Image (tube, helix red, strand yellow):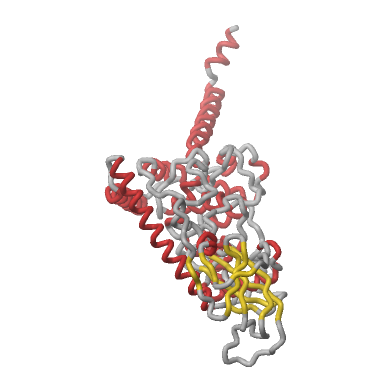
């Protein structure tokens, strides 16, 4: 009879086959768990043991990758949406890791691991051997944990809804009024964007920004590592509301973590509906890869591409410049006017490669560029963080008219009007000086008189 080791409230709980789960009495101070980890810690499996649990960091990378790959394949999930919550070493009773049922299994003991993984709304329990060459989903335990977690989320949402309604009524406005006003404003903005033809990217961004600044923000982020005054909070919250990006099971967003090419392809697929413009052969991404369809679509629609060897490099981290170029090329934007004049806005414009300057200028005109903490520093070669990619992606949606602009001092296009005016005034002054030279202006006449 196989046994499972599981960590709960600082100790290991042993479950004999059957895995009966007993719910621990919740704390009065915190009756509603707020993350999968808290749900797990609020559950107990029958019988206890003094054996201590292993840390997540002690789990071999090969096992983590194998488990994530299996979940991604089964549920088409981005691995960035998954997190290992608990692990424990375990010696399984047979070659089927104690899950053989009617299968013929070797009877030798198999050392291995129990791995608990969580996403935003689901939990999985996996049994593995010592190196991760054998990975098996424990469906019974997974279903019980997920059922518990789902019930908790439903109750938590009810409490949040009641609290929000009470707060808004006290403030003199109801949720329904605020939401309807937001929906009406957004619908009006989309109609304006779709029916008005605007020449020049700067003018387009000004109109979107002007209407967006009048909309009351009602979406709030619930991520524990993002404060309400965080510079990218609104960008992130809106993309979460649109189901384009997600946080992690532990309630965090991890805004400073990098974004891989595969992860970005998955975001693009959710954000944009574009027509296929080319066929692409991808050599280094298996059709079983969790993001294969998203990668193929991102390449075929022009957002991303493969190298000369037809390799996509799905794990490669993206720079800020690469993200901007992908969005600009995928949306088929081109610069309207002088790229050199537009890029004067950036103090580090010299760091932008010459061959892509027109594309960066186009991204600036369209309001896609967001620079924190200094709006005048592009930092093109810096690895893009999750927060920065969220800001770029949201602004790209603004540029297409799919959503409304967020008032932010870090969007380069909001300040771009000043540069455009300065350049125009400079050009006009030069033209005036040339006319005066041609006609013999007053200054020259005065000098001659002297």
Q: Which of 369 and 106 is in front in this view?
A: 106
Q: Nearer the viewer, residue 132 or 37?
A: 37
Residue 392 position, x and y percent, is 53, 51
Q: Is residue 55 above or below residue 256?
A: below
Q: Is residue 396 above or below residue 76?
A: above
Q: Nearer the viewer, residue 181 or 409?
A: 181
Residue at 31%, 47% in the rendered image: 166
Residue 389 position, x and y percent, is 55, 52
Residue 51 position, x and y percent, is 67, 67
Number of numbered discs: 0
Taking the image as shown, residue 322 lies to the left or right of residue 180, namely right
Residue at 59%, 76% in the rendered image: 288
Taking the image as shown, residue 172 lies to the left or right of residue 142, namely left
Can residue 261 be spotted in the picture? yes
Q: Looking at the rendering, which quadrant does residue 103 occupy?
A: bottom right
Q: Nearer the viewer, residue 373 or 59?
A: 59
Residue positioned most to the top: 450
Residue 252 position, x and y percent, is 54, 54
């Amino acid at each position: 009879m196989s046994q499972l080791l599981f960590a709960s409230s600082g100790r290991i709980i042993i479950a004999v086959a059957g895995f009966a789960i007993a719910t621990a009495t919740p704390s009065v101070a915190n009756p509603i768990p707020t993350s999968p980890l808290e749900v797990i810690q609020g559950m107990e499996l029958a019988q206890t043991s003094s054996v201590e649990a292993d840390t997540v960091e002690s789990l071999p990378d090969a096992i983590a990758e194998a488990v994530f790959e299996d979940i991604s394949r089964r549920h088409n999930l981005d691995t960035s949406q998954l997190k290992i919550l608990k692990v424990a070493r375990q010696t399984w009773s047979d070659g089927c890791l104690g899950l053989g049922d009617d299968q013929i299994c070797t009877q030798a003991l198999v050392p291995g691991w129990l791995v608990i993984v969580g996403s935003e709304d689901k939990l999985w329990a996996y049994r593995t051997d010592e190196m991760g060459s054998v990975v098996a989903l424990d469906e019974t335990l997974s279903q019980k944990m997920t059922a518990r977690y789902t019930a908790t989320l439903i109750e938590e949402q009810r409490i949040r809804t009641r609290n929000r309604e009470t707060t808004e009524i006290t403030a003199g406005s109801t949720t329904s009024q605020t939401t309807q006003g937001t929906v009406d404003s957004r619908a009006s903005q989309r109609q304006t964007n779709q029916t008005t033809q605007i020449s020049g990217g700067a003018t387009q961004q000004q109109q979107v920004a002007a209407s967006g600044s009048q909309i009351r923000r009602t979406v709030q982020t619930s991520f524990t590592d993002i404060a309400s005054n965080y510079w990218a909070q609104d960008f992130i919250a809106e993309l979460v509301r649109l189901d384009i990006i997600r946080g992690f099971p532990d309630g965090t967003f991890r805004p400073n973590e990098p974004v891989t090419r595969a992860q970005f392809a998955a975001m693009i697929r959710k954000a944009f509906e574009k027509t296929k413009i080319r066929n692409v052969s991808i050599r280094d991404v298996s059709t079983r890869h969790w993001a294969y369809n998203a990668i193929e679509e991102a390449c075929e629609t022009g957002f991303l591409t493969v190298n000369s060897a037809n390799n996509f490099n799905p794990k490669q981290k993206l720079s800020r410049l690469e993200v901007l170029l992908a969005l600009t090329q995928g949306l088929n934007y081109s610069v309207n006017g002088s790229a050199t004049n537009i890029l004067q806005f950036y103090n580090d414009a010299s760091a932008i490669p010459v061959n892509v300057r027109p594309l960066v200028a186009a991204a600036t005109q369209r309001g896609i560029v967001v620079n924190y903490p200094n709006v005048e520093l592009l930092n093109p070669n810096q690895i893009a963080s999750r927060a920065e990619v969220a800001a770029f992606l949201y602004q790209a949606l603004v540029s297409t008219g799919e959503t409304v602009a967020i008032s932010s001092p870090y969007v380069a296009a909001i300040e771009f009007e000043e540069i455009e005016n300065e350049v125009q005034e400079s050009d006009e002054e030069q033209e005036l000086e040339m006319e005066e030279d041609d006609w013999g202006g007053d200054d020259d006449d005065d000098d001659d008189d002297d």
